[in-house]
Amino acid sequence: MAKTPGRSDLPAAPSPASPQDIRNVVLVGPGGAGKTALFEALLAARVPGQRTGGPGTTDHVRTTTLTTASFDSGGVALNLLDTPGYPDFVGELRAGLRAADAAVFVVSGADDIDRPVSLLWRECAAVGMPRAVVVTHLDQPRADFATTVETCRRTFGDARATHWPVLEGGVVTGVVGLLTGETSDEHEEARSALIESVIEESEDATLLDRYLEGETLDTASLLADLRTAVELGSFFPILPVSPLTGAGVEELLGIIERAFPDPTVHPLPMVTSPAGGQVSGVTCDPDAPLVAEVVRTTTDPYVGRLSLVRIFSGTLRVDDTVHVSGHLGDFVGHDVAGHPAHDDDERVGPLASPFGDAHRPRGNAIAGELVLVSKLTRAETSDTLSSPDRPAVVAPWLLPEPQLPVAIRAATKSDEDKLAGALQRIVAEDVTVRLDHSAETDQVVLWTMGQAHVDDLIGRLADRYGVTVEAEPYRTALRETFVRTCSVQGRHVKQSGGHGQYAVCSIRIEPLPRGSGFEFVDKVVGGSVPRQFIPSVEKGARHQLEKGLLTGHPVVDVRVTLVDGKAHSVDSSDVAFQTAAALALKEAANESTMALLEPIDRVDITIADEYLGAVMSDLRGRRGQVLGTEPADAVGDDGGWTVVHAEVPAAELSRYPIDLRSVSHGTGSFTREPARHDLLPADKAKDLLRG
């Protein structure tokens, strides 16, 4: 089915009267848990004519991107976001968490809730996101709802089943509400555990005593306490859902509509002014000054550039003039390619409610809503939209640091002409990509989140911008250095009519400790080199060292001492002595006097304890030096995590995000920063050094 921005068969876009009528909900969970099927089942339950399963549903493949559908659900405007579950696209997940006020966490009843799943849970916990847990795949042979519930409780904390599946012939045909339905003896233990958890969350201190004394508690009061606990994020209901049969879908929608918080309840992010200083009085009120944030930027083949915007305060209207602020570098501590600091005023283009790949026009959108804005040419992902007379900057969500470098080159001359512009758009849209143009290695490098992210980026360049690129081996920036002291003479003598060129300089070259850089020393006596040409010798030496001597890499950690020389009263010049100094250095450079230095990175690896031995062994294979370890219990409530501090050659880290994920079964993460340069082993340097 073709992409249809203006489909006439879609329901009218919901126009909530107030923020209390809005629910922003994100689906979170590992790949293969059934998020997309659940997404479609929820739409089918509320959108007339919407089908589940297969193509033609939401008309979008949601494996790598954030997708949104806005529709009416039980009297509230529900903005439902589907996020990718693969670790490479954690940036899309965090954008979805920023846009939403509550999460439906999807797990498979046929699979283990392992460390990678618990890491996704902690992504939600890190932003204080209220959650409900949905268990899918209960029709599969290995599925066991009771076991999954118990595992969720151990892993997630205060989580209890609020509903129980009814299975007939291995198929989930319905669900039973443990507080509201007709429960059997087999459900009594789960029902009692649920009631006790609800009582613990209740503000009524008498409930526990009354329950222990055998009093039958009022169901309505229990449900009210349950909803309050869910809204506050202190209790997580678990319920079975079968997207195939629809069992449990209405029950989940009931929790979303009646227990999930509206935008006025969920805390707002920190808001400052472009000049600094916190902006006060930002509230989820349609009549307040505008504060909104671009959570995602894409390019649509029909309508061009599209910005998915979360409105935190005020009302956004078509043709309004808004202030666009982008100060991402101020928050992450360094300049971000594609996201330079800027403050601009811009007119708002057409607004629309998203529905998969279809767009339903809107005249305005109020605080708490998600809306698509067309043709915002100056706004990039994470930028803030605000009132021109009260400009604001929303603190961005936590951005993951891309750690996998991939060097690319254009496949043809035609691709080369379009590549720069396409890359500029890619990095502006995707804040998890960093672009480097390395003059030293003459490579264009994309820093990415992993191989799946690389494949997605290359696919986007081809499909969206018509640019074909090829990957090439990533090269680290080496350095040259001298390893022994030597004395040489540089002689530059030319006579070609008129003034000639004459300069002779004798220099001594000495290695210095790592990190010392370059030193120049003048020890000329007797005026053999006139004083006005001493700086020329230093300038020539510096220039040649920057160009390199054997491999084209800069020379560092060396002292050059000018000890003697000769000059001519007519033919000596600044250029002649620069050239003589360069010739002297070249004369000194050979495989016996020089060596290569490679960059060493400091890495901090966070790893589950059960994979610590494998990670340490892998580091040894990468010529890494472990500096120490320490517990990292703060990573999760269940503990069992360690941070490994090490130094590793940068060349050995070029594929480390992929290898670490494999070695740690998806649990490992790491940060890196340059530490220093150190000697490249002779066996690795021999093919690079040349006399």
Image: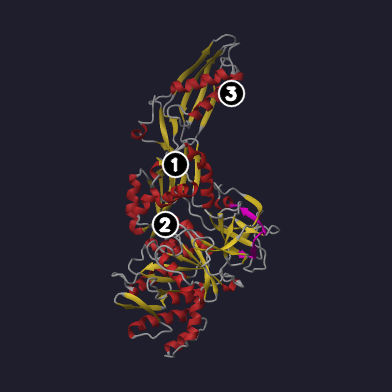
Find numbered disc 2 in the image and state the secondary structure of the residue it sits on: helix
Q: Which mark is residue 535?
A: 3
Amino acid carrying label 3: it is: Pro
Q: Which mark is residue 34?
A: none
> Going from the N terminus, do you reach mark 3 or mark 2 first?
2
Residue in the image at 37% along x and 57% along y? 666
Residue under pointer 1: 408
Which span of residues is magenta-colored? 312-327
Q: Which colour style is shown?
A: secondary structure
> Going from the N terminus, do you reach mark 2 or mark 1 first?
2
Find numbered disc 3 in the image and state the secondary structure of the residue it sits on: helix
Q: Please identify the residue farthest to the top as the structure is shown.
A: 497
Nearest the viewer among 43 and 132 is: 43
10 Å crowding of disc 2: few (<14), some (14-19), many (20+): many
Q: Quadrant of the C terminus?
A: top left
In this rendering, is residue 184 above or below 676?
below
**Mark in front: 3 vs 1:** 1
Is residue 350 shown left or right of residue 204? right
Between the C-alphas of marks 3 and 1, the distance is: 41 Å
* Quadrant in the rendering for residue 530: top right
> Going from the N terminus, do you reach mark 3 or mark 1 first?
1
In this rendering, is residue 689 above or below 198?
above
Between the C-alphas of marks 3 and 2, the distance is: 55 Å
10 Å crowding of disc 3: few (<14), some (14-19), many (20+): some
- Percent coordinates x, y for residue 501 in the rendering: 56, 13
10 Å crowding of disc 1: few (<14), some (14-19), many (20+): some
**Mark in front: 2 vs 1:** 1
The reply to whether callout 3 and callout 1 are in contact (CB within 8 Å) is no
Q: Quadrant of the N terminus?
A: bottom left
In this rendering, is residue 500 above or below 477?
above
The reply to whether callout 3 and callout 2 are in contact (CB within 8 Å) is no
Nearest the viewer among 9 and 309 is: 9
